[in-house]
Structure formats: structure tokens, C-alpha cells
Amino acid sequence: RTGLDVTTMSKRAMELQAHVEIAERVQDLVSLAYDRHLAAHSARVRLEGASVDSDDSWLWHRELSAKPSRQGSDGDRPLFHLADIGPRGVSNWVRLCRQYPDASDAIRARHRAAGTVTARLVQLGAAIEKYVGQNTAERRRSKRLEGWCKKRGKADTYASRLARHAGRPFASFVVDPDKWGRAFTDAYNSAKHPERAGNASERDVQLFNVSAQLLLTCVLLDRAAGSRRPSTTLLADYRLSGLADRMQLLIKTDGAAAPPVEGPAVGN
């Protein structure tokens, strides 16, 4: 248990859902840190002008209080800490979740609902494409250089571009961001078009799901924090070292000898 209290306040009247959304996004952030969904125990609503002696109105909300359909790791040690993001980073996180809903929904979906590994791969692949595409459009509208969004030749993939953008921590995790991006994209396209030859095995799809969720998580956390500190801390966690070894083996051997996924339930 984290013992964390989340308070939202507004100076003007707002829909209740606006407050719930903020609390839910912070809940998602904490759940990512602990690699398991953490349900809210209770909530209270206080109205300005109410007597100090009056009781608070108690609130139950399905999304905030619902129990998870599956659990992640049981350990009490988080994969990253608030200090890695900073107080301002939490508000930035909420803003980024609103700005890039596909990416943020993709990395919290594992905590909310169960599904097949193939469906998860399609969700993550689409989220990566949408995030890179949206950033490309934003840069063009603001007349900035495309920077990391720019495609390097015809064979360059959305996944490779985002993997390179994630920096050294993720590059060390997968060894080669470009090879990882191409391998991930091949598996993603095969999942979208199962009639094609060369479909990845379920074991390999699990590994791609792990790495794709970590990629999106690191990119959003680092952007919220304004530094690489969150991804450096997260990917250096000893509980992910086995996953990194298997991911690297998969890339080097084209999936020929990668052992089954074990360890923390990051991804699906």
C-alpha cells in the first residue's frame, strides 16, 4: 500500500468527471510504478462554504475503486519514484495523458482489462504510430524541424523512430533500436494481417509487448519529468534484467531461441 492521498481543487464549478479524470491519471501513474493496479479505497467531496462541522460527502467511483482483472508484480518496491519525476512532472503527466490519449491508454490498458497478446500488440503498435504521427504534425504546425520524428529512409519505421528518441536507456535495453523497431513492426503488421506468412509466435509477441509498453512508458515519463531520469531508473531495475536479456536474444536470433517470458508482468 502506498498510503497516497490525491487532492484536486477548483476555484470555479467543474463537472465531477473533471476531478475524477485527474485522480484516475495519478492512479494510473502510481499503478505503473508498482506494476499492478492500485484501487482507490475511498474518496470525499468537500464543497466551499459548507460548515466545518458538516460531514464530507463520500464518493464511490467505478473506475477509481474497481478491482483489477489481473495483477502484476507483488513486490512493494516501485519501478520508479515520485522523485524521479518531480511534483511538476505529475501535472505534466496528466497533461500528456490528455494530449496523447492513445499512448496513455495503451500503457494503462494492461491494468484495466485482460485481452489476447495479439490484440495487445495491435493496440501498442497503433499507439506508437499515433504518437509519432501526432508529434510530427505538431512540429509541422509550429514550423519546427521534424527532429526525431523525421523518417530515415523508406525502411525506417514508426517504432524505430520512437525507440531512437527514447535515448540511451531504452537503446541499452534492446541493444539496437532500429533492429528492434523493424522486428516489432513486422510482428505488428503480421498481427494486423494474419493471412500473411511469418506470424510471430506467442512467446515472441509477449516480448514485443513488454518492450513496447516500456518504450511508451519511458517516453511519456521522461517527457513529463523533462529528463531521462525516470527511464534510467525504470530500465535499470533488476527485475527487468531478465526481460532485457530475452529481448536482446530475440533481436539477435530473429526469435529462434528466445526463452519464455517471466518476471514482472510489464506488458501482456
Image: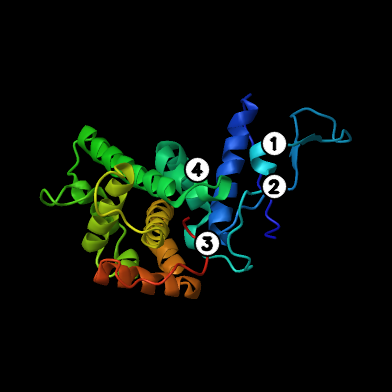
The N terminus sits in image quarter = bottom right
In the image, 155 versus 51, the foreground residue is 155
* C-alpha separation, residue under disc 3 versus residue under disc 1: 26 Å
In the image, 105 versus 117, the foreground residue is 117
Q: Residue at x 49, y 69 (%)?
A: 262
Q: Nearer the viewer, mark 3 or mark 4?
A: 3
User: Mark 2 or mark 1, which is nearer the start of the sequence?
Assistant: 2
Looking at numbered disc 2 in the image, what kind of residue is underneath it? Ala
User: Mark 4 or mark 3, which is nearer the start of the sequence?
Assistant: 4
Report which residue position mark 4 lands on: 94
Residue 239 lies, with reference to residue 18, above or below; the image says below
Residue 197 lies, with reference to residue 255, above or below; the image says above
Q: Residue at x 49, y 62 (%)?
A: 84
Report which residue position mark 3 lands on: 265
* C-alpha separation, residue under disc 3 versus residue under disc 4: 24 Å
Q: Residue at x 65, y 42 (%)?
A: 64
Q: Nearer the viewer, mark 3 or mark 2?
A: 3
The residue tagged with tag 4: helix, strand or loop?
helix
Report which residue position mark 1 lands on: 61
Report which residue position mark 2 lands on: 40
